[in-house]
Image: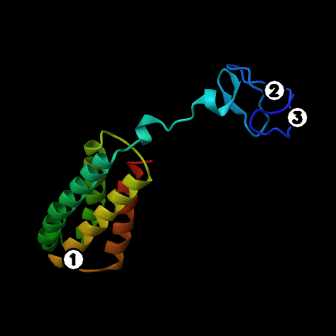
Amino acid sequence: MYCDRHPKIETNLRCGKCEKPICSKCTVQTPVGARCSDCAKLTRLPVFQVSIAGYLKAVGTGLGAAVILGIVWGLIVPYLVGFGYLLALVAGYVIGELVSRAVNRKRGIGLQLIAGDSVAVCYLIALAFGLTISLYSLIALGVGVFIAVSRFR
């Protein structure tokens, strides 16, 4: 008996649902046994399926939050006396959470990029409104980006 998709490969294994002969290259292990790729119906999990409208919502929410938080951050940093860089952590958490809620807790690499870039935009806006560049603020920016990105793993 030869594989249905690879006619030159001999096999004794059959799909557990449709009984087509399948080789080790075609086998998909499922909780109920070996299946062919047609019967296994491999699809992405719904939590990782983000529509274009979802991405647009994420971009709008991320940039909107970045602008507002960046302006606030830049304006209140003189009153925090040396601890203004810690607002990068707050910005990372808030932006990550808002973007996550906007897309109904979906996940994925595209959303990670949107959240991380939004925190970076927030930092740049804060620089324009009075934040000064320092080693601590750059490290806090990296941690803020990590916090925002980790909401989508």
Figure coloring: rainbow
Going from N to C along the chain, the mark reached first, 1 or 2, is: 2
| Amino acid at the residue labelled 3 | Glu
Going from N to C along the chain, the mark reached first, 1 or 3, is: 3
**Of 141 and 28, which appears nearest the observer?**
28
Please name the residue shown 70% across and 23% down the image.
33
Horizontally, residue 126 falls left or right of residue 149, namely left
Give the residue pinned by disc 1. Answer: 127
Q: Whole-percent x and y of residue 58?
A: 28, 51
Q: Whole-percent x and y of residue 5?
A: 74, 37
Question: Residue 146 appears in which quarter of the rendering?
Answer: bottom left
- Judged from the image, the secondary structure of the residue bearing numbered disc 3 is loop
**Of 147 and 135, which appears nearest the observer?**
147
Give the residue pinned by disc 3. Answer: 10
Q: Whole-percent x and y of residue 19?
A: 73, 20
| Amino acid at the residue labelled 1 | Leu
